[in-house]
Structure formats: structure tokens, C-alpha cells
Amino acid sequence: MTDATFNQDAWLERIGYQGPLSPTLDTLRGIIAAQSAAIPFESVDVLLGRVPQLDLAALQAKLVTGRRGGYCFELNALLRAGLQSLGFAVVSVIGRVIRGMEPDAGGRPATHMLLRVELPEGAFLADVGFGNLTPTAPLRIQPNREQATPHETMRLLPVGAELTLQARVRDAWQSIYRFSPNPVDDIDYAVGNWYTATHPASLFVSNMIVARPGPDGERRALFNGRLTIRRAGVLLEQSMLADEASHAAALRDVLGLTLAEADLSAALAEMARRGSTGVESPFFS
């Protein structure tokens, strides 16, 4: 997932970042805020039976030139390439999603890509690819330290030799994923990506999911036709989208995603075929 032809200027234009480019904590903070706001989390390709391609040319064609979104392997691989092009020292790590579970929950596959960025101030977690609880700021990799972001307050809870990322939502800590800070090879991402995009138990195979952090702490999500906007875990708006036109408008105006008409039509038809239209998720509603 590395390539000498990375187009840094196009990436920076895509995420709308115009700040300093030196590899500092302030730059990292600005880049994470910009990319998480500009490029939505979405898994429409997986619903349509397409395994996301993780080579850099494909990532740039889809996320930058094509102005689509993606899920963790795509979004964080693009972030990694961008940060490396700016001179950041980036280590690739992988996590196990445990949303709604105990911090030490076992039996979970390694299917979440995230990054460790080494700075003079220490090591920081960088992740722009976890749906509606994506950390919108770098998090110092230091156990039990509560850290503010533009959205939730987060912390890293030690679990043996690993760390569990938690977010405080409505005064309760929710586990998100557990990871080891040790590096992994890209083949581990390829395996996780294949599992996530093809396994019948994967959330993305049968559901249409789009999420994007909004301003003033908002979290915006579309799950199987249900559009939800929350702030600090409190519901602000929720509605069922009635037809293709309302989906297109919500995707464009609320979630920052423009799908090709054929892809949107196919996604809605696939939801109907699988019986998932209107099906809820406790984590996206």
C-alpha cells in the first residue's frame, strides 16, 4: 500500500487542509480533523459485493479523484500515505472491534486498521476510519489518560499487553476496539479487509452504512435508510429516508457523499433483497 506516485497536493485539496506541513503534533491534529470531516466513512462497495482495493493507486482513484468515502482499511491507508509524504514516522497497527463489549472481550478478529505516529512528544494514535466514533484528534498512547477531542472524550484502558480505546458517551464509557501498539505487515490488513468485505457475519456485507463527524460535536450516520444526527450521544434528528431521491440528498448534503446513480440504485435494491432496509443498529442510530 505504498507507492512513489502519491499525489500529496490532490490529497490535501481533497481534505481541505491548508495549514502547516511540517511533521509536528499541531499538523497531525489539523490533518486528522480535516480528513475525518472531509472524507466520509462508507461501505457501499462491500454491500455491492466489491472487495475494496488497498493499493495506493486504487485508493487515490476512489477517495481522492472519485471523491468517494471508504472504511478503515481505505481511509487509514490514505492517511498513512499522506502523513508519510509529509515526513511523519508512522507505524501500522491493527485492532479488534469490541463495540458494546467488555474491554477484554475475546474471540474477535483483527479487522481494524489504525496508525501509531511517533513524535518528539511521544507516540500518538491516529485513526480516521471508525464510523460514527472515529477519533477526530490524535490521542497520546498513554493508559488511563482522559483526552478531549472535538467530539467525545476518549481514553486508553490497559488490558494485559494491549490497550482498549474507549469513548465517553452520555457519561458512560463505551469500548470501541482493542489493539497492540506493535507493528504489523500489510498482509495482515489484506486478510482483515477480505474477511470484513466477504464474511457473512460482517456488518458491512448486508447493511448500507455511511457516517461522518459534523461540526460542534455532531455525529451523523445513515444506516439502512435511517438518518441519525446526535451530539454527545443525545439524539438531535432522526428520519427514515423514503426513496432514492431522499437518499441522494441526504448523502450529498448531510454526509458529504455523492454516489453514482447506478450505485445508489443498486445499493437500495440490495438492501431490499437482503431484508435490511430499516433494520437498526445500536451503534448507528
Image: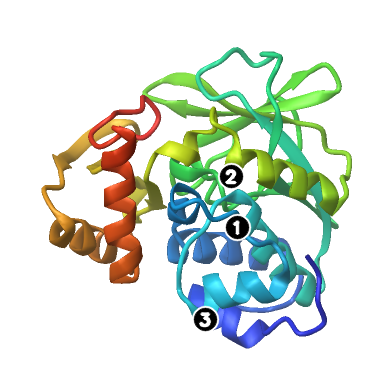
Earlier-in-chain disc, 2 versus 3: 3
- Tell me the distance, in whole angstroms, between the alpha carbons under discs 2 and 1: 7 Å
Earlier-in-chain disc, 2 versus 1: 1
Asked whether, in this view, residue 253 is left or right of residue 44, the answer is: left
- Tell me the distance, in whole angstroms, between the alpha carbons under discs 3 and 1: 16 Å
- Three-letter amino acid code of the residue under disc 3: Thr
Indicate the quadrant containing the C terminus: top left, top right, bottom left or bottom right. top left
**Which mark is nearer the camera, 2 or 3?**
2
Q: Mark 3 points at which residue?
A: 65
Q: Nearer the viewer, residue 16 or 210?
A: 210
Asked whether, in this view, residue 85 is left or right of residue 198, the answer is: right
* Relative to 183, residue 253 above or below: below
- Residues at discs 2 and 1 in contact (Cβ within 8 Å): yes
Q: Which of 230 and 260 is in front in this view?
A: 260
- Three-letter amino acid code of the residue under disc 2: Ala
Q: Residue at x 79, y 70 (%)?
A: 84
- Residues at discs 3 and 1 in contact (Cβ within 8 Å): no
The spot of residue 273 in percent (x, y) is: 30, 40
- Three-letter amino acid code of the residue under disc 1: Pro
Can residue 192 be seen here? The reply is: yes
- Tell me the distance, in whole angstroms, between the alpha carbons under discs 2 and 3: 23 Å
* Relative to 148, residue 159 above or below: above
Quarter of the rendering containing residue 11: bottom right
Indicate the quadrant containing the N terminus: top left, top right, bottom left or bottom right. bottom right
Q: Mark 1 points at which residue?
A: 52
Q: Please, what secondary structure does the residue beneath circle 2 have?
A: helix
Quarter of the rendering containing residue 142: top right
Q: Which residue is drawn at 64% across and 79% down?
A: 20
